[in-house]
Each structure stands twice: as C-alpha cells, then as structure tokens.
Image: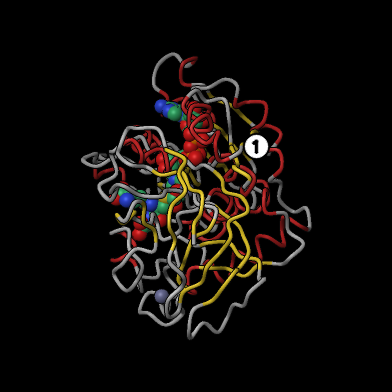
Amino acid sequence: MKTRAAVAFAAGQPLSIETVDLAGPREGEVLVEIKATGLCHTDKYTLSGVDPEGIFPAILGHEGAGIVVDVGPGVKSLKKGDHVIPLYTPECRECEYCLNPKTNLCQKIRTTQGRGLMPDGSSRFSFNGQPILHYMGCSTFSNYTVLPEIALAKIREDAPFDKVCYIGCGVTTGIGAVIFTAKVEAGTNCVVFGLGGIGLNVIQGLKLVGANMIVGVDLNPEREKLARQFGMTHFVNPKNIDGDLVAHLVELTKGGADYSFECVGNVNLMRQALECCHKGWGVSTVIGVAEAGKEIATRPFQLVTGRRWQGSAFGGARGRTDVPKIVDWYMDKKINIDELITHKLTLDQINEGFDLMTRGESIRSVVVY
Ligand code: NAD
Ligand code: AHE
Ligand code: ZN
Ligand code: ZN
C-alpha cells in the first residue's frame, strides 16, 4: 500500500513529506494506522546526527497511537479495529529480560530494531524502489506502519489518540522513572533537572507519590509557571544562582535530595544531579540521552559515601502491561496530559514542530493525521 510519511533522508536535514510504499504485515506483525504522534526530543537527537544508532534514510517517530488495520499470520493478541500504542521497548514476556523482574528492557528484537529493521531483518518501507529504515521499531511519522505484535500495547477504545499518544514515550518515561525505577517514597525531597516534555512528567509523578519538596531546575524561565501547576514547589534557574549550583541545591533540600532526575541529556548536569543528592542514601536517575562520545564523571567518593547513580529507559515500564494502566490513569483524571500538549500540527507542519522544540516554545507538539 501507499502511505504518507515524513522521511529523514539524511542527518541534519528537514524531514521530507512523501508518499512511500509499505509492504503488508508478515508472520507475527501488525499493520497500524497511526492517528496521532508526539515529537520527542529523542527524534530531534537522532535527526541531528549524534545518535550512534541513527541511520538514514529512515522514518522517525516513536510516540504514537492508532488502530490495527490488519494482522499477519500467527498474531494472537490483537485483531483488526483494536486501539494500540506502539512500544519502542517491547514486552515479549518470554526472553531472559522479560522473565527478570529487575528490568523492562525486553531484548527479543533489540538487535534488528537498532539496525532499523523488522525482526526478520528486512524493512517494510520503500521509496522509489529503495528501502527506507524503521526507527526505534515504531516509525510513527508515517500514517501507516508495521510493528511486531510484541511491540503494541492494546488500550481502551474511548481514549483520545491525540492525547494518549504521549503515553507512548514522554508520560510513561517521566512518571515511570519515579514510580517504577526510583520507587520514590512519600515525604521525600526531590530535584528535577530539565522541565520539558519528560521533566514535567517526572514532576507530576513526584506529586502523585506525595513527595515533600519538588525542586525544578531549568534555564528557561518560561517553564516555571507550568511546572508549579504540575506540583513543583521550588524553581531554580542556574543563571540566577551566585556560586555553585550543587551547594545551593544541597542547602535548599537541607542536606541533599533523596532523589534526583536528569531530564536533559547533558553530562555536566548528570554530575550535578548526582552530587546534589543526600550523603548516605540519595539516588540519582539519568533519563536524558547524551550524544555519542559523551561520558559522565564524578569523584568515586560521591558513591563511596552512599549516593547511587542509575538510569531509566521508558520509565522502567513494561509496555503491554503498564501502558494500558497509564491510559486508565489519564482517563480517570489521575494524571494530566492535556496541558502538556502545547501544539497540534498536521504532518506537513512537522518541521515547525522541531523548530518550536529548538526554540523552547513547546512542551509537546502532536501531529494529528
Ligand atoms: P525537552 O527539549 O522538551 O526538554 C529539555 C529541557 O531541558 C528544556 O526545558 C530546556 O530548557 C532544559 N535545559 C536544557 N539545557 C539545560 C541546562 N543546562 N540546565 C537546565 N535545564 C536545561 O526534551 P524532553 O522531550 O523532555 O527530553 C529530555 C531528554 O530525555 C532528552 O535527552 C531525551 O532524549 C531524553 N529521553 C529519554 C528517555 C528514556 O527512556 N530514557 C525517553 C524520552 C526522552
Ligand atoms: N540510540 C541511542 C539510544 C538512546 C536511548 O537511550 N534511548 C532510550 C529511549 S529514548 C526515548 O525517547 C532507550 O529506550 N534506551 C534503551 C535502548 O535499548 O535503546 C544511543 O544513544 O545509542
Ligand atoms: Zn521519546
Ligand atoms: Zn522479552
């Protein structure tokens, strides 16, 4: 079939809106009509050319929601008409990783996914007879896409696509990092670096679990108002701090954060996020994605004296199990998504969405097909 898609032909170039060819679903695969997709900072990161797994030409996008149009042979858990959210972290429920409760990083299809291919080693997309690669196993910047059955969460049918698409990455990543990865307790003092599409979801996760102090750190003063609305209790703009930011945060939190989260992808901030943690027990969670070649550093003494450093991918969530529950939280008004979606665009306007992100003017832009 033919489908409209925003194609990344090369790193650093704007996406190009094209009609591409899409082959039907093979064994264990599902054809999905994407109804809406969010633009995540990670799409911009890959498009910029600094992602070691960024290969072109490709169809980016990994924060979508849509409807099953067709299923390939052997597909058991989904049928035509089901509403779904694509999962860049699949859940096969049988690999060594899925069977270990300590991780959500299903590895069943990770190798081919990282090479822009379906599990059988081929691509379903092509343009003028040349293959176009998939991205993060999702390629939601295409109106229709093919995914493995294990990479789709079935969701309730009354959930609006243009909102719950954000659960496909940002919402789950932020709230999940608090609940599933860090397992933050009520009454704790927490610091969040970066108040964008991920950091604001960390903030609402912290509010949900009853954190005491929720300190937000961002260079963009425009972020303060919305962050306070989502539960931030103190705002720190590093530009307005005389002296050392870490010392300031330790003093503000009366000895250091019980939990901190880095939601920017800046290795200097990752160090500050660790070092503002409380001696003896503070835990810092890295969420931001740093470009190829970047490394983190600290004095090992920081760890010897009881601070811990960890990371979180997709908020530690197991997609097929947890994503439908997070959709319920949204539908039950336990979490707020609507106010974080600042811009709605058509596919033709997708490059403007990336410009808004670069200028710090959007939290989430959503393309509605
Ligand atoms: P975003 O662009 O919406 O937000 C980034 C925020 O960081 C902005 O508010 C910006 O003003 C702020 N910022 C930039 N430099 C700063 C600095 N030096 N000090 C303080 N604040 C600063 O991006 P996003 O969509 O929220 O994504 C954030 C990061 O999380 C990205 O690196 C993205 O790739 C990553 N990410 C990781 C996962 C995961 O599973 N681990 C999932 C999604 C996104
Ligand atoms: N290809 C990148 C990996 C970037 C990365 O860490 N991705 C996160 C999701 S970001 C979503 O917005 C992730 O899930 N990581 C686990 C994994 O297996 O990729 C790079 O830098 O190499
Ligand atoms: Zn993302
Ligand atoms: Zn698995």
Number of numbered markers: 1
Residue on which the image places disc 1: 344
Residue 122 vertical placement versus 40 (above, below) = below
- In percent of width and height, residue 94 lies at 42, 82
In terms of depth relative to the viewer, which is nearer, 117 or 223? Answer: 117
- In percent of width and height, residue 341 lies at 65, 39
- In percent of width and height, residue 2 lies at 49, 57
Task: Give the residue displayed 53% in from the left and 27% down from the top.
Answer: 356
> What residue occupies the far front of the structure in this picture?
128
Label 1 sits on a secondary structure element that is: strand
- How packed mark 1 is, by other alpha carbons closer than 10 Å (few <14, some 14-19, many 20 or more), is some
Task: Give the residue displayed 28% in from the left and 59% down from the top.
Answer: 115
Q: Is mark 1 within 8 Å of ligand 1?
A: no
Q: Whereabouts is ligand 4, in terms of quadrant?
A: bottom left
Confirm whether residue 49 shows in the render.
yes
Residue 89 vertical placement versus 160 (above, below) = below
In terms of depth relative to the viewer, which is nearer, 124 or 77? Answer: 124
Q: Amino acid at mark 1?
A: Lys
Q: Horizontally, is 210 left or right of 358 in the view? A: right
Confirm whether residue 263 shows in the render.
no
Task: Give the residue displayed 46% in from the left and 74% down from the top.
Answer: 29
